[in-house]
Image (cartoon, rainbow, N blue to C red):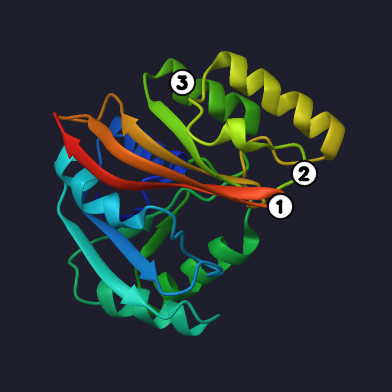
Amino acid sequence: MKVASLFSGGKDSVFAIYITQQWGWDVTHLITLQPEKRDSWMFHSINIHLTEKLAEAIDIPLIKKQTKGEKEKELEDLKDILKDLKIDGVISGAIASEYQRTRIEKICSELEIKSFTPIWHKNQELILRDQISAGFKIIVVGVFAHGFDKTWLGKTINEESIDELIKLRKKYSINEAGEGGEFETLVLDGPIFQKKLVLDEISKEWKRDSGILKVKKAHLE
């Protein structure tokens, strides 16, 4: 089975690749849509410039395209990429977003290929713990919900921080995996990486009750 993978550099898109490779499938390409607007309905934007380095680290060719990030129209940009690839399907890291899943499935149906979501509707706490136990190094690069503060920016996702996320879920009804947009992540290393991503220069921006960690310089080693 030859598939392409939607790729943001976040924990779920990387983990979907890992699972797919465990199945023995050939992930031929990584696909990144870079939205001009941060509030894209479909695609992540925080530190999306790092996908080139991450693709090199994972050793899978990357196809990257700008998109205006306009609702529905951004899907045509994805379709334009997929129509030229010789693949059987597309994988994505969607866990609970019906909006993302149904629209990817629509595009795939039009192109007569399959849509695969390896972690769809899995227990979200267990997904986090599985990602850590598999050996992925994940940090938080954006927080956008009540209960988070500046200390979360750059925090490593580990057993301790997962326990903190569970507490925030109970207190503020957040999604512990960030599927509701509560936080975004960046993967620095893991079992499918040939090299690890090292952050050389970062900055933290905080406004009221949300913030992002921008990576200004990074290298592979």
Distance CA(mark 3)–CA(mark 1): 30 Å
Which SS class for mark 2? Answer: loop
Q: Is residue 5 above or below residue 118?
A: below
Which SS class for mark 3? Answer: helix
Q: Identify which residue is drawn at 25% across, 30% down.
A: 192
Q: Can residue 55 be seen at all in this image of the molecule? A: yes
- Residue 78 in the figure: left or right of residue 103: left
> How many marks do you count on the picture?
3
x%, y% of residue 40?
A: 52, 70
Q: Which residue is mark 3?
A: 132
User: Quick one: 78 or 139, which is closer to the camera?
Assistant: 139
Question: Which numbered disc, 1 or 2, marks the residue closer to the eye?
Answer: 1
Badge 1, how many Cα within 10 Å: few under 14, some, many 20+? few
Q: Identify which residue is drawn at 62% across, 56% down.
A: 97
Q: Which residue is mark 2?
A: 146
Badge 2, how many Cα within 10 Å: few under 14, some, many 20+? some
Disc 2 residue type (three-letter): His
Disc 1 residue type (three-letter): Arg
